[in-house]
Image (cartoon, grey):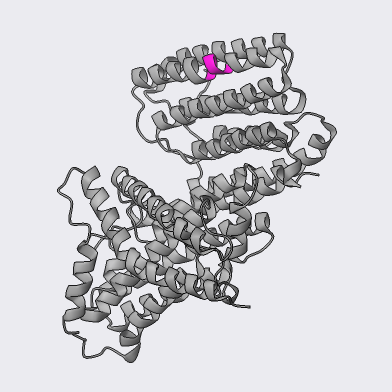
Amino acid sequence: MTTAIPFSAQLINLFAAVILLLAFAMLAQRRMLSLINLFALQGFCLFLATLVAAVTTGQVHLYYSAGLTLALKVLLLPWILHRLVRKLNVRGEVEALIKIPTTMLVGIVLVMIAFNVALPISELSQTITRGTLGIALAVVMLAFLMMITRQKAISQVVGFLSMENGLFLAATSATYGMPMVVELGIALDVLVGVIILGVFFFQIRDQFDSLDIRHMEKLKDN
Amino acid sequence: MISIAGLLGQTFAILLALVLAPLLSGWVGQCRAWFQSRTAPPLLLPYYMLQKLFKKDVVLAHNASSLFRAAPFVIFGCMVLACAIVPTLSTDLPFAPAADALALVGVFGLARVFISLAGMDIGTSFGTLGGRREMLVGFLAEPALLMVIFTLAMIAQSTSLATIVETLAHRDLVIYPSLAFAGVAFTIVSLAENARVPVDNPATHLELTMIHEAMILEYSGRHLALIEWAASLKLYAYSCLGLALFFPWGIAGGDSFLALLAAIPLLLLKLAIGGAILAGIETVNAKMRIFRAPEFLGIAFMLAVLGLLVRLLLETRI
């Protein structure tokens, strides 16, 4: 049973499990700065998982995507987000729309759904990392949940980025990553997206004196 | 069936638990003081405390029932039994078939019921308050602990602690991600169950925050000594359980006496590191409001369930 799994796949499974754990930790996290740090940590685990997959399979483009992950999601994006938080001065607590324990329970249900959905799909795949497909799907859904339940714009962006992490993991686990062009495109999109959203944050704050996006529901065109 | 070596090992394990448990508490206290740059109390402080308390007379309230007098002995007995079931040095324990991991949770539960009842027995408001809070923490911590045990039981295909530890200790290098989840959940549960800092502060008598201390306020003399000793035994049992489940290397398997001897320094080392880590956790965390405790323990439960799910998804492959 378990002995049939090669060591590298076990390692990848471990990292995938830690990524899932971190997704939950982000869901439970109240503080903005810790949230960003958790996101950086999640990126680092993703980098390690991709690196192990690259070393095991010898696929060159996986090395590139691992490097891209490290540069972008571990170093650059958290740095940008940290700067944004500092500039916007939003260190305080993040309010969630739903109470955090409830969110957790919903999260567990989502994980169960994701695992069940992914099970037949991952059996079609031939990669050594196919077991992590369920986890990747779960991370995507948890990130969705976070975007839904959080009010502050920055935590929504972190949710969005975390979702990208999940997609990346799914791509790596199902087919050893997307083609390089696609990957580069996505990475650039995310980067530009965060920069633009950063500008938006300032606009939102200037307009409403707060980053709470509930204010935006009251927009009226007149 | 029961070998002499097994019997010896069992007796030795119980005696070791009785002797080491206050030492572990003392060590945690010392580490805590060091981390907070205070002057550390002596390592043997819990022994002095026990000695002092055993010498003193018992003062009983007028309306104390026999339950109040019996409770310390029941609690102490439960904790000794728990220490006997948990494999500390060897997995060859004649007591092991008597109670598996689920029964161990039950033993802890029994002790909890008695200490809460004893707290309420006198009828002071503090005792009642402590008893209620204890039950609140307990009913949230127990399912999480059970989930952790289910995860481990699925790996070992058995709920017997000895079998679980043997399977985990004598495996090839297989990484179980589910164990990581279970480990974190177990840490949270043991913090809550042992009245350590994020949930309760063992060193406080502040009425708003205390849980464990509130229940035992009315105890004195040898009763208090037994309860204090039982508390350190509980910490010891939880530490050993955690070490045996998540760091099982070095626990003697069969009835080799040499392996048993070799297991002692390793156990001491692991306990010393574990105690220092516990003190570290207690230092960097602030005591949380009692209403935050359900959330904290909910996280433990969630992690344990996740561990179970991950076990099902990742580790049972064809």
Task: Please report the bounds of the magenta region as a residue range.
Answer: A69-73
* Residue that appears at 72% across and 28% down: A173
Q: Can residue B124 be seen in this view?
A: no
Question: Which is nearer the eye, A119 or B132?
Answer: A119
Q: Which of A84 and A212 is in front in this view?
A: A84
**A23 in magenta:** no
Q: Answer with left or right where residue A105 lies relative to residue B207.
A: right
Count of numbered circles on the image: 0
In the rendered image, the residue lying farthest to the front is: B258
Where residue A138 sits in the image (x, y, percent)? 65, 37
As displayed, is residue A156 above or below residue B238? Answer: above
Which residue occupies the foreground of this view, A22 or A101? A22
What residue sits 58% from the left and 64% below the top? B161
Left-right relation of B291 to A221: left
Q: Where is residue A67 in the image (x, y as percent from the top left)?
A: 58, 14
Q: Is B306 on the left or on the right of B279, as rendered?
A: right
Q: Main secondary structure of the magenta part?
A: helix
Residue A51 image offset from top left, x and y in percent: 62, 22
Instruction: Name the residue at 41% across, 79% down.
Output: B77
- Where, by quadrant of the figure, is residue B227 drawn? bottom left
Answer above or below: position of B126 versus B204: below
Residue A8 is situated, as x and y percent measured from the top left of the image, at 67, 31
| Viewer-proximal residue among A27 and A210 | A27
- Is A70 a magenta residue? yes
Which residue appears farthest toward the right when viewing the image? A124
Residue ID at (49%, 25%): A40
